[in-house]
Structure formats: structure tokens, C-alpha cells
Image (cartoon, rainbow, N blue to C red):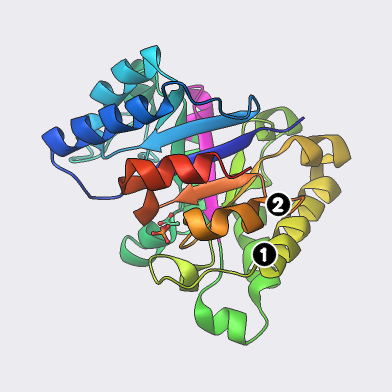
């Protein structure tokens, strides 16, 4: 049975002290709570806090992920962080191809593919983001856009490699805007993505792939989004910065 995953993308928020407080708050709230045994909680803080989060993660119930990685292995790439470095912190996940990186850092599907290769080389699980912008949705092109992102970013992998991939469908028009895809819109495109995976790698691989929804997911809408058969959890931005909201979403299955 594929995993339910609720991953918090903190983006560029929190000082060190605030990050420490938030992690402790999340851990306190998790005490005595029984999460669905099939649900994995992931937090993705900024790079400087990964070591701290990873140390807490050892004792608690969440896995830790980075928000980005270099497409290069090592060397003279000032400011970059390699997959080998992330592996040495014993992280589990790394987000790749977030729409903010695609928009502000010109991250193409080819770059996403190289980052995915780096992560797999160092035993990290990529959470690969895809999703259309508003104009593409209005023109009815969301399926073509997502198909291209998935095909060009991921379909060079073997089936064995693909088994480590988590996909996050994040309609760009719903990220940080308060607009959420309806449960029907989310289910429709998640089922489409699973169908693409089945065509390429077979039904068994597709059935085991966790496909998360992201875009203004909050406690008030998580339940109806997660109730869909092809929605296996969420990539949560704003609402992951408050322990109460994050835990409420994690318990919405
Ligand atoms: C995100 O950036 O991955 C995201 C889903 O953000 P928000 O939940 O704030 O829309």
C-alpha cells in the first residue's frame, strides 16, 4: 500500500530560534497523537536548519527533507548544496522543481532531471513538483503541461529508480494565493499522472507512487482533498509554519 505523506515546505521563513521552537511545538503536539500508521510526516526547513531538524527527527516521528539541491556533484559552485552533503546529514527527502524555483531560478525540466539523478545517486527521495500556471489552466492545457514536466523530468529513470520518486501536483495558481483546486480538479489530474506512470512503468509501480497535492492546503480543506483515491497527501507551504495547522492536516486522512 502506498504511503500517505504530509510534507511541510517552510520556504525562506524562520530564524534559527523560531525554527527550533516550531520543531519543538510540532513534536509536543505529536506526543500522544496516533497518526495513521501509513502516514509519514516530513519537514523541509531551509538549509541552515537541516542538521538541527535531522537530529530532532532521529528521536521523533518525522523525516527531514531539503528544499533544493545542486545538479552538480561537487566543486566550484559557490552557494550550492550537493546531494552528497544532504546525504551526510542523513536526510530522507528533497523537493525538486518547485514552481518558485522554476519561475525565479529558471529551473527547466532538464535541470530537474539532473537534480533527480543526483538525489538518487546519494540515496535521497526526490519530491518532484509539477503543475500549470493560471493561463495554462484557463486554456485547458494543464494535462499537456504536467505530462511534459513528468516525461522530461522523470521518464529517463528505470522502474527501479522511479520507485523512489514522490510527485507533488501543485497548480501554480493555488500556491500561496488562498485558492485551492477543488477535490474534483485534484483527483482528475492525480489520476491522469498515475495513468502516465502506469503507461511508462506498469500498474504496479503506478499504484505504489505517492502523489501529493500542494496549493493552499489547510486544515479546513485537507480532509476533502485527501479523501480522493489518487491524492496521497500534501506538500504544505504556509500552513506548515504553524504546528497546529500542520498537525491538523497530517491527521486529516
Ligand atoms: C508550496 O509552496 O509548495 C505550497 C503548497 O504553498 P502554500 O501551501 O502556501 O500554497
Residue 214: x, y in percent?
52, 56
Disc 1: which residue: 183
Q: Which residues are magenta?
A: 118-130
Q: Residue furthest bottom?
A: 139
Q: Is residue 120 magenta?
A: yes
Q: Residues within 10 Å of mark 2 (few under 14, many from 20)?
A: some
Asked whether, in this view, residue 11 is left or right of residue 203, the answer is left
Q: Is residue 201 above or below residue 61?
A: below
Q: Is residue 70 magenta?
A: no
Q: Are marks 2 and 1 in contact (CB under 8 Å)?
A: yes
Mark 2: which secondary structure? loop
Nearest the viewer among 178 and 189 is 178
Residue 191: x, y in percent?
77, 57
Tell me the distance, in whole angstroms, between the alpha carbons under discs 2 and 1: 8 Å
Disc 2: which residue: 227
Q: Residue furthest front?
A: 32
Residue 76: x, y in percent?
21, 35
Q: Quadrant of residue 61?
A: top left
Q: Quadrant of the N terminus?
A: top right
Task: Specify whether residue 169 is in view.
Answer: no
Q: Residue at x 43, y 65 (%)?
A: 175
Q: Residue at x 66, y 78 (%)?
A: 141
Amino acid at each position: 500500500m502506498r504511503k500517505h505523506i504530509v510534507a511541510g515546505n517552510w520556504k525562506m521563513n524562520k530564524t534559527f530560534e523560531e525554527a527550533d521552537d516550531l520543531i519543538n511545538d510540532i513534536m509536543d503536539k505529536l506526543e500522544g497523537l496516533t497518526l495513521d500508521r501509513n502516514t509519514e510526516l516530513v519537514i523541509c526547513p531551509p538549509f541552515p536548519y537541516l542538521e538541527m531538524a535531522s537530529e530532532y527527527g532521529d528521536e521523533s516521528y518525522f523525516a527531514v527533507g531539503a528544499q533544493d539541491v545542486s545538479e552538480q556533484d561537487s566543486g566550484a559552485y559557490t552557494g550550492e548544496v550537493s546531494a552528497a552533503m544532504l546525504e551526510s546529514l542523513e536526510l530522507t527527502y528533497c523537493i525538486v522543481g518547485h514552481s518558485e524555483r522554476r519561475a525565479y531560478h529558471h529551473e527547466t525540466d532538464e535541470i530537474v532531471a539532473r537534480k533527480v539523478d543526483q538525489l538518487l545517486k546519494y540515496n535521497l527521495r526526490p519530491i518532484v513538483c509539477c503543475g500549470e500556471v493560471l493561463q495554462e489552466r484557463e486554456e485547458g492545457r494543464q494535462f499537456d503541461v504536467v505530462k511534459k514536466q513528468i516525461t522530461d523530468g522523470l521518464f529517463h529513470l528505470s522502474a527501479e529508480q522511479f520507485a523512489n520518486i514522490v510527485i507533488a501536483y501543485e497548480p501554480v495558481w493555488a500556491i500561496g494565493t488562498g485558492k485551492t483546486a477543488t477535490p474534483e480538479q485534484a483527483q482528475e489530474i492525480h489520476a491522469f499522472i498515475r495513468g502516465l506512470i502506469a503507461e511508462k512503468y506498469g500498474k504496479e509501480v503506478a499504484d505504489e507512487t505517492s502523489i501529493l497535492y500542494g496549493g493552499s492546503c489547510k486544515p479546513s480543506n485537507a480532509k476533502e482533498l485527501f479523501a480522493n483515491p489518487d491524492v496521497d497527501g500534501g506538500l504544505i507551504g504556509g500552513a506548515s509554519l504553524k504546528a497546529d495547522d500542520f498537525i491538523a492536516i497530517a491527521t486529516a486522512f
